[in-house]
Image: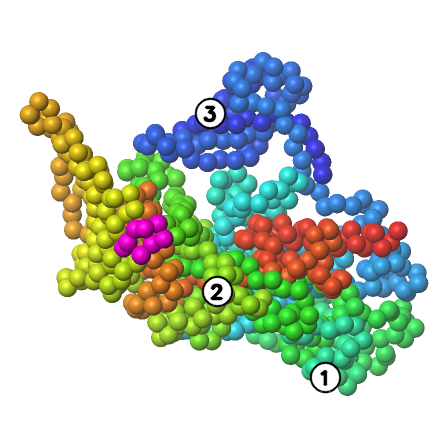
Amino acid sequence: MRGKTVIRINELKLRPDHTQQELEHEIRMLLQLRGQSFQYEVMRRSIDARKKPELFFVYTVDVSVDHPQAVLKRAKKKRAVLCERWDYEFPGTAMEMECIAEEAEGRDGRRAPAGEQGCGAMHRPPVVVGSGPAGLFCALMLARAGLRPIVLERGERVEARVETVNRFWQTGELNLRSNVQFGEGGAGTFSDGKLNTLIKDPDGRIRFVLQEFVRAGADPSILYDHKPHIGTDVLVGVVRHIRCEIEQLGGTFLFESCLTGISEGGCRVDGGAESVSAEHAGQSDGVCGDVSQVGRTADGTCEVISQSGKSVDGIWEDDTQSGKAADGMREDALRTDKPADEEDGHVSQPPARYILEINGGERTLEADDVVLAIGHSARDTFELLQRSGFALQPKAFAVGLRMEHPQQMINEAMYGRDCPYELGAAPYKVTHKCADGRGVYSFCMCPGGYVVNASSEEGRLAVNGMSYSGRGSQNANSAIVVTVTPEDYHATSPLDGVAFQRELEERAYRCGNGKIPVQYFQDFCRDDEARTSRGDGSCEVRASRSDGGCEARASRSDGGCEARTSRNDGSCEVRTSRNDGSYEARTSCSDGGCEVRTSRNDGSCEVRTSRDDSGCEATSEKWEQKDSRTETVETHVCVTPEETALSPEIKGQYTFADVRSVLPEALNQALIEGIHAFGRRIPGFDRGDALLSAVESRTSSPVRILRDPATCQAVMHPGIYPCGEGAGYAGGITSAAVDGIRIAEAMCRSYSSASR
């Protein structure tokens, strides 16, 4: 890492419509720089909306200046501190990287004989399984180190994948290998490209990942925005750019190539194809300089394997949608007349550690080092690893529903009504701890986004959220989820979490008859009568009324009483009677408004009303009993226009159905409690016409592939590197990319150590 001393200014506040000159002026005044030149870099920008309608951008800025210690002494305020900032560099000296690169390819451009290799450890290029953010960044770092990785991806390259996914959303025709979950770019390609992460990374990998995204075409604002995002439309080009660089550095992508078997070297796997060493054979005239390989079929003859993973019978294939072969024969790429170990620069190699089976035995690949960046939905690969003796562990994850609200309502809650600034679609983040101890929270929030059908298996249905870079949809959506642990789904096997996910997705599929099931929140809250005795001595009674409403009454252990009423007009009222004789009634109305009425035991009464329509901002009425007189302190009355029901913004076919039937009732109750709690923070969040879609089941991997913390290699399987979200070591695009970089570092350390 490269370090440099900077002055870091925290909490630098400016109005959102400020100019660049105003920002520079504030820096100069705070540091008393006068005529001294300086450079600065914005490290973070957030919005302070605590005192609406006054809003501020809050900056963290790093300033580079001569003699920073002296400048800091005369700075006006204490918000400026001296900071040593480290820029990430891939570890290893240039000599070590050159040695490793020479190991992958001889000094004359061909593979060196085993006895003459400079580092003495690497005989075959590393194989990366999966091209999501973890796989892409791992392959990128390996390629920059000269190791020419081979990337296996079950789905299509990203350009073709977008067309396949759009066709699925329009027709319901599911491609099991290439969909929202699988294909180049991973599942994150169709989830807004959100880059916020909670991981700690003092070594600078997070900023390095963001810088690489900008280098590949993302907006530079992701380097400093509090909640950065790229957008699905832009992310497609970013992914393609990274792939092109890897290929230009000698890496190979094999699309539509699914890992279906793994065995120890020297063994023969089912499928009949004899394993051979993967050799790079040159470049085609296809997109990004596609690289092909030579493989050997079951009868011992060699074939060219194109980037798409298909035999081209001696013709260099241009991997385009037309499927036509490119002009020109590559005789040097065909080795059908000579065995691979003949004396022409290719000599016998030590046996491979592993034989990888591709597409059920269509071909096999020898490998010594394999990165498993398989993604959280690679359930068939989890099953393969379990059969192959890998150590797997069930883990906690979250399930729930995707919830839609008007984006305008969220904007007003976050920024205030009639905000004069163009701040874009506002995000939110909410959490709640339920009475039973469960946590309910928002996940993968998509401002101005769409709910999307994210299914990857026949007869099962999952949803996700997605935004384009402009975030122009009328609705905001977020997953509202509940954490489930292995104890919740009664895990006795590492894959029981997968079984639980599949059960929920099968229910969702049946609920909507193959379409996304959707339900208004007011309908979701209706239920048959139920009585619950709680462990704290309280009791709850839930009743469905003849008018279509629902009432829940809870008598509390402190002597108070709470009654919750959901009405068929979409409103909801919560009335709390306290043991001191006072009571409070809170009404969430179908128009998105909220009313709170408090009657106190001193005879006073207060009414507060807030709505999200243009007719009224707030109503506050207060009566206080003073010397037998009733005094009105404040009154403001307005008329609210009639509200129309919210319309879904969904990519994929949908239908209104009984969403409540999808999740276990305990989770439904937790979601209802959490959503009403969120309504007390964001007015209208629990409005009756808010939309719920089922089922959000792919929040993270339900499995962890155990790896050694020191080497990052799988337990009892040297040379296998579990990586990213699917392996259970990340959660989101940025953390997965960071883990991919860590795995590349570990692999290079291993090669470097073996060379000494």
Residue positioned most to the bottom: 299
Which residue is rendered at x = 16% and y = 30% of the image?
602
Of mark 2 and mark 1, the one earlier in the sequence is 1
Residue positioned most to the front: 537
Magenta residue check for 710: no
| Element class at badge 2 | loop
User: In the rendered structure, which segment of residues is drawn in magenta?
Assistant: 533-540
Amino acid type, label 3: Glu
| Element class at badge 1 | loop
The residue at which mark 2 appears reads as: 489
Q: Provide residue 563's location: percent of width, then percent of height.
A: 22, 50
The residue at which mark 1 appears reads as: 272
Q: How is the image coloured?
A: rainbow
Amino acid type, label 1: Gly
Q: In the rendered view, would you say 230 is above or below 308?
A: above
In this picture, residue 398 sits left or right of residue 553: right
Amino acid type, label 2: Tyr
How far separated are the C-alphas under marks 2 and 3? 56 Å
How far separated are the C-alphas under marks 2 and 1? 39 Å
